[in-house]
Amino acid sequence: MLLLVPALADTARFRADDPDSLVIASLACPICLRSEQVRWEAVLDGYDPAVQCRCPDCGERWSVYLAPQQALRLSLIGAG
């Protein structure tokens, strides 16, 4: 039997004027809740800007979808 696990996806929960620490905390791993070491890459082109995240502690991968203002805010921080 083939067991399919759904891909994790979320919507960003920060405001464009939030401090960097809150923006990074909003990308915390949904499994182990760590945010310090999360690696992320912004995919800001196209219709649905998003951040592809990976947790080095537990190995989980997930996507966080962004509003246009959030995408601009993350582009100012740079890749994690």
Image (cartoon, grey):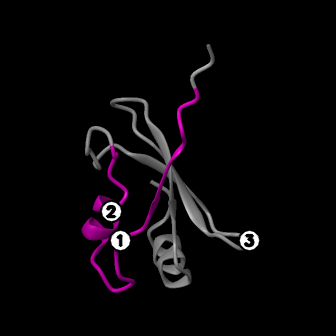
Magenta-span inclusion, residue 26: yes
Lateral position of residue 10 relative to residue 5, left or right: left
N-terminal of the two: label 3 or label 1? 1
Amino acid type, label 1 = Arg
Lateral position of residue 43 relative to residue 6, left or right: right
Circle 3 Cα neighbour tier, 10 Å, few/some/many (<14 / 14–19 / ≥20): few
Above or below residue 2? Residue 56 is: below
Residue that appears at 38% across and 45% down: 38
Residue that appears at 28% across and 60% down: 25
Q: Position of residue 6 (x, y in %)?
A: 54, 39
Circle 1 Cα neighbour tier, 10 Å, few/some/many (<14 / 14–19 / ≥20): some
Residue that appears at 33% across and 86% down: 17
Q: Report how far apart the C-alphas of labels 2 and 3 lie in the structure.
A: 22 Å
Identify the residue under disc 1.
13
Q: Which mark is residue 46?
A: 3
Say whether marks 2 and 1 touch (CB < 8 Å): yes
Identify the residue under disc 2.
26
Q: Position of residue 28 (x, y in %)?
A: 32, 52
Q: Secondary structure at mark 3?
A: loop
Q: Report how far apart the C-alphas of labels 3 and 1 lie in the structure.
A: 20 Å
Magenta-span inclusion, residue 34: no
